[in-house]
Amino acid sequence: MIPTDRLEQILQRFQYLEARMAEGGGDLARLGREYAELRPIVAEIEAWRKLRADLAEAQALLDDPDMAGLAREEIARLEADLPEAEQALRLALLPRDAADARPAMLEIRPGTGGEEAALFAADLMRMYQRYAEAKGWSFEVVEQQESELGGIRELVAQVKGEGVFARLKYESGVHRVQRVPATESGGRIHTSAATVAVLPQAEDVDVSIDPAELRIDTMRSSGAGGQHVNTTDSAVRVTHLPTGIVVTSSEKSQHRNREIAMQVLKARLFDIERRRAADARASARKAQVGSGDRSERIRTYNFPQGRMTDHRINLTLYKLDQILAGDLDEVIDALIADAQAAELAEMEG
């Protein structure tokens, strides 16, 4: 059932924004953002309304003997198109995650599996780098600690571009790999894991941090294997005392390190607040796909069979090489579709 009263409210708001922007009054940046958010919804409303109007017009022609044949053909075509238009409109009306348009902080850490887990974490980093490149996004490494064999002990990266968090948020969780490690001489298949966390980048208005609640330490930067990459005490470690969250940044500029560490800290604190609000909304039901539960095993990458399985939606694809090369759209599109179907069922149930 399409809520026609809500459609009218959206159209009236859209027309109001259009008029205000034409006058040049008010906060144009804020008005422009809201206008841009409503424009695709209005397009779906207009398409759905036109189909219904055309259908009513064709049905009226059934009484005309000269036009009845053509009218029946037109009615059949319009009735076939109407369900798709209704579904597109229902999806457009779903509540938007306010963080969807934001940049994201991507964090990758090895889990069980020792050096092989660190190597797999590096594979995941390259996968997301290639995906970002394919989408025209920027991928900036904020913090990276390497293992002896070139794996990753910890990675924090900032990803910027259109719709970054909307697509990457489904990547949070435990990623499992099954393969013969480079460190294995007997050819046995090992299972190891890495944890991915995707956080929307916080804005200053989202998080208020009392400087008295921070402990900021400077220390000497170190690279792979613990060897010093420079001799200045430039690395910065920020500890948020109330939560115990610790963030480290090891760029060469101490000022830049402090800025980066605060960005990451704000993102983590903002994520805690988002989770708290989501938990309150979802207290009566199980969390849906995209909840970002970092303890949940979400995906398995099986090298011997060239197979990737996403356990949340039971999706299996035999294109592991392409996926690790950054071809993630098919997986992410399926996750988004599943999440939208669950939201629709909840709204209409």
Image (cartoon, rainbow, N blue to C red):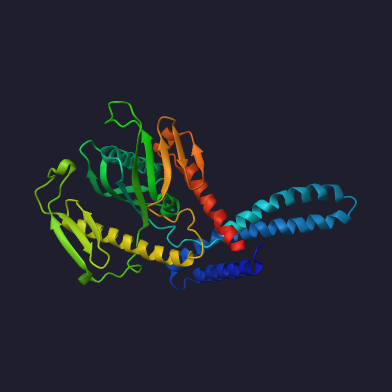
Which residue appears at 9% of the width and 48% of the height?
A: 231
Which residue appears at 21% of the width and 67% of the height?
A: 214
**Residue sitting farthest toward the bottom:** 26
Snapshot quadrant of residue 118: top left
Which image quarter holds the N terminus?
A: bottom right
**Residue sitting farthest toward the top:** 186
Is residue 162 visible from the viewing direction of this image?
no
x and y percent of residue 246 in the render? 24, 59
Which residue appears at 61% of the width and 58% of the height?
A: 89
x and y percent of residue 62 in the render? 86, 54
Snapshot quadrant of residue 343: bottom right
Which residue appears at 55% of the width and 71% of the height?
A: 16
x and y percent of residue 69 in the render? 85, 47
Snapshot quadrant of residue 194: top left
- Residue 192 in the image: above or below residue 335: above
- Residue 48 in the image: above or below residue 230: below
**Residue sitting farthest toward the right:** 65
Query: Foreground residue, 347 or 1?
Result: 347
- Say whether residue 92 is left or right of residue 113: right
- Say whether residue 300 is left or right of residue 60: left
Query: Foreground residue, 175 or 28?
Result: 175
